[in-house]
Amino acid sequence: MQPKVKGKKTQIGKSKGPKREFSFPLEKENFMIIGLGVALLIIGYFLMSENSVNGFLPTVVAPILLVAGYCVVIPYGILKKPKSEMIAAASESTPEAETSNIKTS
């Protein structure tokens, strides 16, 4: 026989606070840029698969495309802020809103 425990019942998975709206940080423009980076990677690997050791495309162009895709285009697509956020941030930091601690006499 188990003793009865009186007290508050806890509900798992339910929060008591207000529900927050989830917004995905990446927009369509970000995905387009990331897609361009993936296309560069595919073209770079395709050019690298050529069976020529002394060829210009597999030894020069393909590595340049791969580095550009991995190190420039895809990170830019991930880190680029949407225009709506940039406009909101610019309106919050207007020069009139900033106060100076420098005393002039």
Image: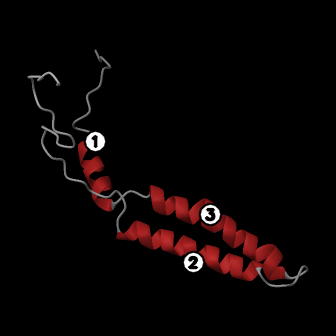
Nearest the eye: 88 or 27: 27
Residue nearer the viewer, 12 or 25: 12
Q: Nearer the viewer, mark 3 or mark 1?
A: 3
| 81 or 98: nearer the viewer | 81
The mark that comes first in sequence, 3 or 1, is: 3
The amino acid beneath tag 2 is: Ala
Q: Which residue bears the numbered disc 3?
A: 70
SS at badge 1: loop
Mark 2 burial class by Cα count in 10 Å: few <14, some 14-19, many 20+: some
Which residue does the numbered mark 2 point to in the structure image?
39
- Element under disc 3: helix
Q: Which residue type carries mark 3?
A: Tyr
User: Which residue in the structure is indicated by mark 1?
Assistant: 93
User: Where is residue 94 shown, x and y percent of the image?
Assistant: 26, 42
Could you tell me how far apart the alpha carbons at marks 1 and 2 are, in whole angstroms? 38 Å
Question: Of callouts 1 and 2, which one flags the residue occurring earlier in the amino acid sequence?
Answer: 2
Q: Residues under labels 3 and 2: Cα distance?
A: 11 Å
Residue at 42 percent of width and 69 percent of height: 31
Q: Are marks 3 and 1 in contact (CB under 8 Å)?
A: no
Residue 99 in which image quadrant: top left
- Quadrant containing the N terminus is top left
Mark pair 3, 1: CA separation: 34 Å
Q: Amino acid at mark 1?
A: Ser
Left or right: 31 as drawn, with respect to 21: right
Identify whether 41 is placed above or below 87.
below
Measured as percent of width and height from the top left, residue 76 is found at 51, 60
